[in-house]
Amino acid sequence: MADAAPPSKSRDLDKLLLRPGNLVGPTFDPGVQLRDDLQEYAKILVVGAGGLGCELLKDLALSGFKNLEVIDMDRIEVTNLNRQFLFRLEDVGKPKAEVAAKRVMERVSGVNIVPHFCRIEDKDIDFYSDFNIIALGLDSIEARSYINAVACSFLEYDSDNNPREETMKPMVDGGTEGFKGHARVIVPGVTPCFECTIWLFPPQVKFPLCTLAETPRNAAHCIEYAHLIKWDEVRSGKAFDPDNADHMKWVYDEAVKRAELFGIPGVTYSLTQGVVKNIIPAIASTNAIISAACALETLKIASAFSKTLSNYLTYNGVEGLHTKVTEFVKDKDCLVCGPGVLIELDTTVTLQEVNFLHLIEPSL
Ligand SMILES: [Zn+2]
């Protein structure tokens, strides 16, 4: 019996890209050409090389993408090592983007990853316009807003206020918080952009000061009492520095006293750090699940082998597993992704002379 040929590296990908199907997008053209083009021409930017970013880079490389770039301004810290699996102890202090790119290239043959160790704002607009898809593995709302604004800035509308397809810069955004996460697809002009649904991110929950001062009910209340009230009482004039270990220890000691006074259990040093620095424990498996969803959506956008997620997936692994897709709608007045209002004025008109209210609502 002849030896069977070893399975092709793209065996699993071929099932998606070489065959027709019922769920494919309107532009799907299955075949070897599609697979090869995808590998040769698709250029993907991964923003962030942290918990999600590491996963994303690996997943995209294993999904057949060969031209990846990654941008991250952070250096590797010891506390990253439990989940940012591309990093080792000897990497501490080195730029995340550079080490992540190197490690994935070592393991996945044929992939080329260009790292950028800098702030996202340091790159000019042309840098971002070069990519077919931008995949976000970020933990900050500000950074998402910035990339969203950049991607939406490429969008142009025709004279009938219809978005021009060739100017759309799709984004895939992932986010995790403990056992919860989301994956979403943003196609400017088609789906809501990040700014259209900014209300999805509620303001940080803070405890009312009276609760802290008078009726603490849990360990976090005791810690915030020590941090926000006791510190100012006892050490007023000295700014609290969350990165100063002595300061943190002081808050911890005070929180323990407070907790003993009210018979509240559970104050630990690591919880004190978590509450004061607003740290939500990162769960490696949540990152892996959300990243997998994001990588799949990226592959779908690039190849159209299936219709993309429409448009927001939530995942909750706190008790069992719950996942759901919600179709959010665009804010038609969104200042970031909307067509805006065309105002034609003489070049001599100054900003002060423009009566915006009058232009928007002429009856005013
Ligand atoms: Zn918008």
Image: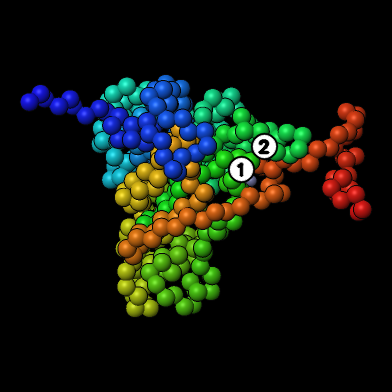
Spot occupied by residue 184 in the image (x, y as percentages of width and height):
49, 47
- Whole-percent x and y of residue 333? 71, 49
Count numbered badges in the picture.
2
Q: CA–CA distance between discs 1 and 2?
A: 8 Å
Q: Identify the image quadrant of residue 108.
A: top left
The image quadrant of residue 353 is top right
Q: The C terminus appears in which quarter of the rendering? A: bottom right
Q: Is residue 273 above or below residue 190?
A: below
Q: How far across and down, in percent of the image, does residue 150 sit?
A: 60, 35
Q: Amino acid at mark 1?
A: Val
Q: Which mark is residue 110?
A: none
Instruction: Describe the element under mark 1 as helix, strand or loop.
Output: loop
Question: Within 10 angstroms of label 1, few (less than 14), some, or many (20 or more) residues?
Answer: some
For numbered disc 2, what is the local secondary structure?
loop
The answer to whether residue 83 is visible is yes
Verify CB contact (< 8 Å) between mark 1 and mark 2.
yes
Where is residue 57 shown, x and y percent of the image? 37, 34
Q: Which residue is tagged 1?
A: 190
Question: Which badge, 1 or 2, comes first in the chain's sequence?
Answer: 2
